[in-house]
Image (cartoon, grey):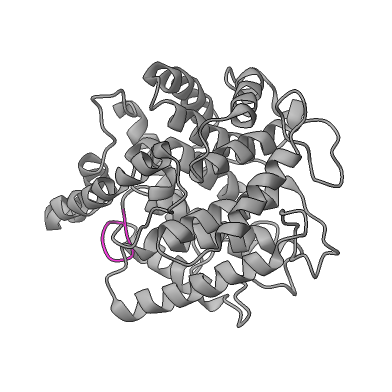
């Protein structure tokens, strides 16, 4: 992305990682350009062939492509005329996740089979922006920080591909105000709750904190101003919530036992910020490996399976840069499990709703396509 920047305090590993983004972004445009009118006329199948993951390093198996395409078609077909998706009254969060799932296929707001759907998702999120920077509706959504964080993440990923100057300026303004809102919503402990600190009695917890950090990281990578101290406070919050076994507890106020889901999400976000090494990170990585890598734990043993593996798949994918086998062994088991639960129409059902589960699964299944910078190695 042309607007991406590397923070001055980034670790060596993070600098290398971000330098790899520009070729990926270029390859995204190149892949779309290669489609031409013939591939677009052929529909999604033609697009998948042109934008397929790299095969030389053991990319997604060809027999899985049709299943991924079926899921993408289902997501696109269930979008409302206003451009949003909804589940349990979380339209902002679901729209950001659904839009990200489609964008990971390689389509942008102007090119590809899902350009119209992505553009409509962006339009909806723009319409949900408040003067104070919040993306969402605080009157109908009691956990609006989730939608706000996911929206920052999605919009920051499409910003670099937006070709309309006026829309780019609009998105830049929206994300600048959104990042400022997040900074002001941070609690004294450095985390976030379901609502902003001033609205929620300074309560914070792990899962919403992760959503904000990854959204802010996406903004900063796209050139949006994000104060360093906000990210630093969030990292210290994560470390403060770490238990002796390497896992992360629910919140700074309610430590309790370690939560595999929150630990996986926290580790993914630390990787996004360039934190790949250190005692805390290594202990968290080892905890996740013991709890999650073999996929033997049932959903009931820790809850929120799709949330957990949405983030842990990102962790293992990044760690796969050091050991390809570590990623491919895990990937094959994860993908087979996901596809074994896919329904005839291409979707998945589960906790929260089919658009949530299907979007999470599609993000996992398309990591190797490497189109969105936030998910790249």
Q: Which residues are magenta?
A: 107-113
Q: Residue furthest front?
A: 9
* Residue 58, quarter of picture: top left
Q: Is residue 108 visible?
A: yes
In percent of width and height, residue 202 lies at 82, 61
Say whether residue 285 is magenta: no
Q: Position of residue 288 (x, y in %)?
A: 63, 25
Residue at figure coordinates x 31%, y 45% from the top left:
19
Residue 45 in percent (x, y) is at 26, 43
Depth check: 240 or 343 in front?
240
Q: Is residue 306 left or right of residue 373?
A: right
- Relative to the observer, which residue lies in front, 4 or 67? 4
For residue 93, side relative to residue 313 (left or right):
right
Q: Is residue 82 visible?
A: no
> Which residue lies at the image location 43% right of the left edge and 53% below the top edge?
8
Q: Nearer the viewer, residue 357 or 202?
A: 202
């Amino acid at each position: 992305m042309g607007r991406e920047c590397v923070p001055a305090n980034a670790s060596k590993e993070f600098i290398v990682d971000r330098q790899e983004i520009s070729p990926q972004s270029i390859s995204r445009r190149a892949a779309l350009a290669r489609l031409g009118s013939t591939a677009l006329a052929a529909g999604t199948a033609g697009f998948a062939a042109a934008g397929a993951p790299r095969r030389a390093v053991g990319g997604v198996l060809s027999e899985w492509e049709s299943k991924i395409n079926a899921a993408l078609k289902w997501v696109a077909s269930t979008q409302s005329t206003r451009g949003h998706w909804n589940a349990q009254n979380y339209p902002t969060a679901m729209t950001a996740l659904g839009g990200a799932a489609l964008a990971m296929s390689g389509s942008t707001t102007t090119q590809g089979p899902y350009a119209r759907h992505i553009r409509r998702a962006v339009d909806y999120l723009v319409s949900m922006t408040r003067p104070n920077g919040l993306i969402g509706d605080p009157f109908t959504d009691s956990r609006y920080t989730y939608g706000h964080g996911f929206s920052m993440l999605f919009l920051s990923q499409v910003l670099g591909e937006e070709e309309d100057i006026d829309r780019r300026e609009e998105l830049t303004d929206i994300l600048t105000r959104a990042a400022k809102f997040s900074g002001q919503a941070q609690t004294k402990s450095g985390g976030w709750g379901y609502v902003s600190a001033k609205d929620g009695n300074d309560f914070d917890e792990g899962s919403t904190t992760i959503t904000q950090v990854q959204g802010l990281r996406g903004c900063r990578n796209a050139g949006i101003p994000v104060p360093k101290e906000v990210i630093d406070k969030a990292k210290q919050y994560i470390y403060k919530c770490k238990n002796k076994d390497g896992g992360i507890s629910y919140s700074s106020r309610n430590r309790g036992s370690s939560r595999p889901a929150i630990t996986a999400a926290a580790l993914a976000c630390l990787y996004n910020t360039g934190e790949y090494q250190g005692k805390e990170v290594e202990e968290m990585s080892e905890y996740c490996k013991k709890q999650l890598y073999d996929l033997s734990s049932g959903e009931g043993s820790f809850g929120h399976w799709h949330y957990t593996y949405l983030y842990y798949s990102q962790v293992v994918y990044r760690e796969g840069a050091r050991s390809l086998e570590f990623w491919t062994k895990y990937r094959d088991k994860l993908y087979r499990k996901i596809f074994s639960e896919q329904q005839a129409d291409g979707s998945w059902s589960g906790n929260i709703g089919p658009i949530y589960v299907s979007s999470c699964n599609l993000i996992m299944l398309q990591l190797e396509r490497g189109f969105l910078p936030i998910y790249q190695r």
